[in-house]
Image (tube, helix red, strand yellow):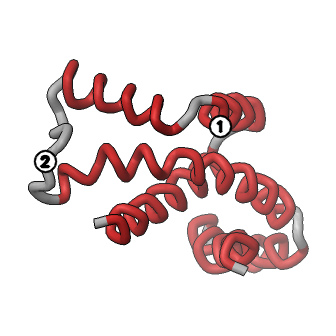
Amino acid sequence: VSCLLGSVALIIALTLGISAGTYLSDRALFFSTCLILSIPSFILATLFQYLFAIKWGLLPIAKWAGLQSMILPSFSLALVPAAFIAKQVRENVIKIRESDFILLARLKGLSESRIFFVHHLPNVLVPLFG
């Protein structure tokens, strides 16, 4: 169970970190990462349980019935690593966006999505896994 939760948390952290690092402004990213990093994860987990399970009734609290029961613990585990990943990704995105090979790809007439997925994203992920 712990390995599965950790794997799902890593996927969520990478997804949140890359999207936040790519699409959020500097101030929004700074504010959200400071907020997430300043709140302990057990308080975040309690807050998520209250909101999503008790108040809104969207997710189960304490049963292991399937994929739906892994959302709250995985999301709670993934937020702190996502904040660190978002900071690293934001720095890498800004650095790589101004590099020569991205400019060359734009001059060749490649679409922005192709530039992002083929040239930009692999170079952004290298420092995370390297």
Can you tell which of label 1 and label 2 is closer to the viewer?
Answer: 2
Q: Is residue 81 left or right of residue 52?
A: right
Mark 2 secondary-structure assignment: loop
Q: Is the residue marked by circle 1 packed among few (<14), some (14-19), or many (20+) residues within 10 Å?
A: some
Residue toward you, 31 or 53: 53
Mark closest to the chain's N terminus, 1 or 2:
1
- Residue under numbered circle 1: 37
Mark 1 secondary-structure assignment: helix
Give percent across and percent down for residue 98.
88, 63
Q: In this view, does 94 lie to the left or right of 37?
A: right
Give percent across and percent down for residue 97.
80, 62
Find the distance from the CA under tag 1 to the CA under tag 2.
28 Å
Label 1 is placed on what type of residue? Answer: Leu
Q: Are marks 1 and 2 in contact (CB under 8 Å)?
A: no
Residue toward you, 125 or 51: 51
Residue found 32% across the figure and 68% down from its top: 4
Residue 47, by quadrant, is top left
Q: Is residue 100 visible?
A: yes
Q: Can residue 109 be seen in this view?
A: no
Residue found 75% across the figure and 73% down from its top: 127
Give percent across and percent down for residue 25.
71, 37
- Residue under numbered circle 2: 63
Above or below — where is 108 with respect to 12? below
Above or below — where is 84 with respect to 40? below
Q: In this view, does 111 lie to the left or right of 13?
A: right
Label 2 is placed on what type of residue? Answer: Lys
